[in-house]
Amino acid sequence: MAEQLVVGVIGGSGLYAIDGLEDVQEVALSTPFGEPSDAYVTGRLEGVPMVFLPRHGRGHRIPPSELNFRANIWGLKQLGVTRVLSVSAVGSMREDIAPGDFVVIDQFIDRTRHRVDTFFNDGIAAHVMFADPVCPFVRQALLGSARQVGVQAHDGGTYLNMEGPQFSTRAESRLYRSWNVDVIGMTNLQEARLAREAELCYATLAMSTDYDCWHDGHEAVSVEAVVAVMHKNVDNARRVIRAALPLLAGPSPCSCASALQHAIMTARDRISPAALTRLRLLIGKYVHG
């Protein structure tokens, strides 16, 4: 039987809805890890089943450090999502990534301090491979669709995930530049880690809104400047998402869907009944009981 393609879209700052969805329904879920950011919006776009979640909630109520990343990803998995397109507003750390450009990320660096970013604790341990943290198949679909609709998109880049919610100091911004990072944001690494544990294909479409505060020729980043560029980017992001769906329709050659196959380290007879019950959605095909 052919794989059922259900695309999940996580909307970042400015992207709170997907235009053109048909058969729209809202689904409110509770998860073993608490409440997601908002109700999930399900429907069809270009005939493809889709689930949309505004990362920060409608009205942008939830700051980055308070996002329930586990509940958000769990809910997508529970609703049958197999591939996740994550849209994120970022600051550019390179001269040639201008505000308004997109970057199709392929690496991350973690500078967060306060975030839970694994499903595997409290009675069970697992270690997924994460050298290549995004799905190459979904990443190429995003890159191809951006080019198809005429959006300036850079092929690959390192996303430095800072804690926030404050923007960088100038010293921090200069330090991160010396590490050769490409963009800076506050949300996507935790999503990527949890999506890998949930065996979902995940990729990030990063929308550059500013030059952080390292660029001498531009004013330090301000909320007003970010919002102005963000509004222009959102329509382009919607066009990229729509164009990506046909490119995602075929079978994926990636290994995301079997990421847990050899990752669960806890002896099967030592996995607590509570952990098995809590994680059955993720581990049920590997651990029986």
Image (cartoon, rainbow, N blue to C red):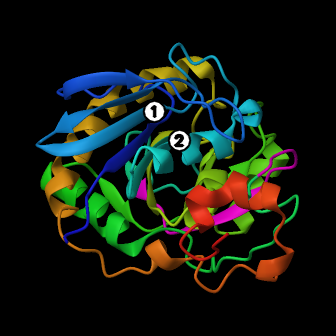
Q: Which amino acid does label 2 sit on?
A: Gly
Q: What stretch is highlighted in magenta?
A: 103-116
* Res 257 → quadrant: bottom left
Could you tell whether 59 is left or right of 45 in the image?
right
Q: Position of residue 240 (x, y in %)?
A: 24, 46
Residue at 37 percent of width and 57 percent of height = 83
Counting other residues with Cα less than 10 Å from the Cα at mark 1, is it few (<14), some (14-19), or many (20 or more)? many
Residue 75's tag is: 2
Circle 1: residue type = Leu
Residue 187 pos. (x, y %): 63, 44
The residue at 64%/74% (across/down) is 287
Q: Position of residue 214 (x, y in %)?
A: 68, 46
Q: How crowded is mark 2: few (under 14 residues within 10 Å), some or many (20 or more)?
A: many
Taking depth in this image into account, of 232 and 74 the one nearest to the observer is: 74
Above or below, 158 against 136 in this view is above
261 is within the stretch colored magenta: no
In terms of secondary structure, where does tag 2 sit? helix
Total labels drawn = 2
The residue identified by callout 1 is 53
Q: Do the residues labelled 2 and 1 touch (CB within 8 Å)?
A: yes
